[in-house]
Image (tube, helix red, strand yellow):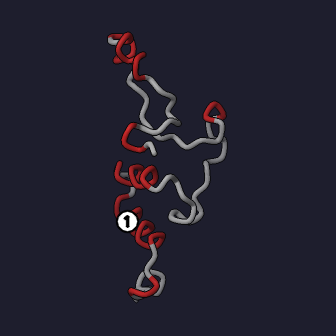
Amino acid sequence: MDTSVGVGADNLTLALIMREKYIATFLNPESFVDLRRYDFDPNVFVGLELPFNHNETLNGEWVRRAQYPSTEQTRNGEEVSKVLQPISVGVWWDKD
């Protein structure tokens, strides 16, 4: 048994659970959902840091939402402009 995984019930932490879940769901959108759910907490996601050369227009903030597709912006721009937010602003269900 791998002791980094089989730590026993008394030593189980959220960080260990999320690490194993990340391994199991790598490249699945659920991984990104978990990052947002726990607010990119480096205590939950040990070693998590902004990537090198992170988009400087985000001012060191994590991406929290997808950008509206350009077709939606050009074909329905009036409505999109009513709800358009920077990608570093949390979506409505992620807000405090």
Q: Position of residue 89 (x, y in %)?
A: 50, 35
Residue at 39% x, 57% y is: 26
Residue that lies at the very extreme toward the front in this rendered image: 96
Q: Quadrant of residue 60?
A: top right
Total residue callouts:
1
Q: Position of residue 62 (x, y in %)?
A: 55, 43
Q: Position of residue 65 (x, y in %)?
A: 43, 37
Q: Quadrant of residue 75?
A: top left
Within-10-Å neighbours for mark 1: few <14, some 14–19, many 20+: some
Residue at 33% x, 12% y is: 76
Residue at 61% x, 54% y is: 49
67 versus 49 height, above or below:
above
Q: Which residue is mark 1?
A: 21
Q: Amino acid at mark 1?
A: Lys
Q: Quadrant of residue 22?
A: bottom left
Residue at 38% x, 86% y is: 9
